[in-house]
Image (spheres, rainbow, N blue to C red):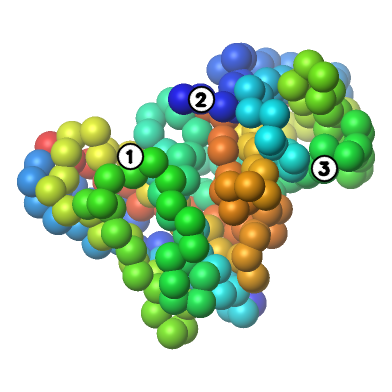
């Protein structure tokens, strides 16, 4: 049962433009959401997170938006840079499940020069 | 500060065999979580070890088992390998439990079962 869904397997964006990655979830118990970035032959690295008590969190070029009523979150990258080309995973956790992370299938972002 | 390391990098096994994968956690971390990432999917939580005790398990059968040692390194053992066990196995270490965003992942072990 896939509780976290990333419906866009890939995204291509021009350098300097905005990248918008989307993620939907079904479990209303999730209270913490994270984005991870993964390069080939490396493990995922933590990018940014947001608690369910917030609707926005910003860190430099990365902003995550949370819409709890729609069970939807998005990651905005502005401006996109070639080094942002990677696979991005959305993940979620909840206190009732010992904070185990549930991941989406990932979105491959390609930033074109 | 040493990051999370995993061994081996790649492994090929035959159906029915047993396999042991190893993970060395980041210095100072006492929690290790294991994930299975099948092709085209996100990582799926297998289990977590905190101070040498299993501290949560995902929907994986008992033939997936693990250990954590006093130095907080960890092993993942899989018995009676099946073709569907072919995947990238990731471990992640953190300080304390729950880990949340403080998890640091290793590069993974690519297991192929033929």
The circle drawn on residue A51 is: 3
Would residue B108 be found to the left or right of residue B110 on screen? right
Alpha-carbon span between mark 3 and mark 2: 21 Å
Quadrant placement of the C terminus of chain A: top right
The one nearer the camera, A75 or A54, is: A54
The circle drawn on residue B87 is: 1
The circle drawn on residue A2 is: 2
Report the residue at 60% width, 27% height from top: A4
The verdict on a common chain for dots 1 and 3 is no
Chain to which mark 1 belongs: B
Report the residue at 67% width, 44% height from top: A94
Relative vertical location of residue B6 with respect to residue B100 in this rendering, above or below = below
Q: Quadrant of residue A107?
A: top right
Report the residue at 36% width, 52% height from top: B109
Chain to which mark 3 belongs: A
Relative vertical location of residue A81 with respect to residue B3 in this rendering, above or below = above
């Amino acid at each position: 049962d896939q509780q976290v869904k990333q419906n866009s397997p890939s995204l291509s964006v021009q350098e300097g433009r905005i990248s918008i990655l989307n993620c939907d979830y079904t479990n209303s118990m999730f209270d913490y959401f994270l984005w991870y970035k993964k390069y080939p032959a490396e493990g995922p690295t933590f990018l940014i997170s947001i608690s369910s008590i917030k609707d926005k969190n910003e860190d430099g070029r990365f902003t995550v938006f949370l819409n709890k009523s729609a069970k939807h979150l998005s990651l905005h990258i502005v401006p996109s840079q070639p080094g942002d080309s990677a696979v991005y995973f959305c993940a979620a956790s909840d206190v009732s499940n010992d904070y185990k992370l549930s991941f989406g299938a990932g979105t491959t972002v390609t930033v074109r020069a | 500060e040493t990051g999370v390391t995993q061994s081996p990098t790649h492994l090929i096994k035959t159906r029915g065999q047993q396999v042991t994968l190893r993970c060395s956690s980041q210095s100072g971390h006492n929690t290790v979580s294991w994930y299975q990432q099948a092709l085209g999917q996100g990582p799926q939580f297998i289990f977590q070890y905190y101070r040498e005790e299993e501290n949560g398990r995902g929907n994986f059968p008992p033939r997936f088992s693990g250990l954590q040692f006093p130095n907080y390194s960890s092993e993942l053992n899989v018995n009676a390998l099946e073709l569907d066990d072919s995947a990238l196995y990731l471990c992640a270490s953190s300080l304390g439990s729950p880990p949340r965003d403080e998890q640091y992942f290793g590069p993974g072990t690519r297991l192929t079962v033929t």
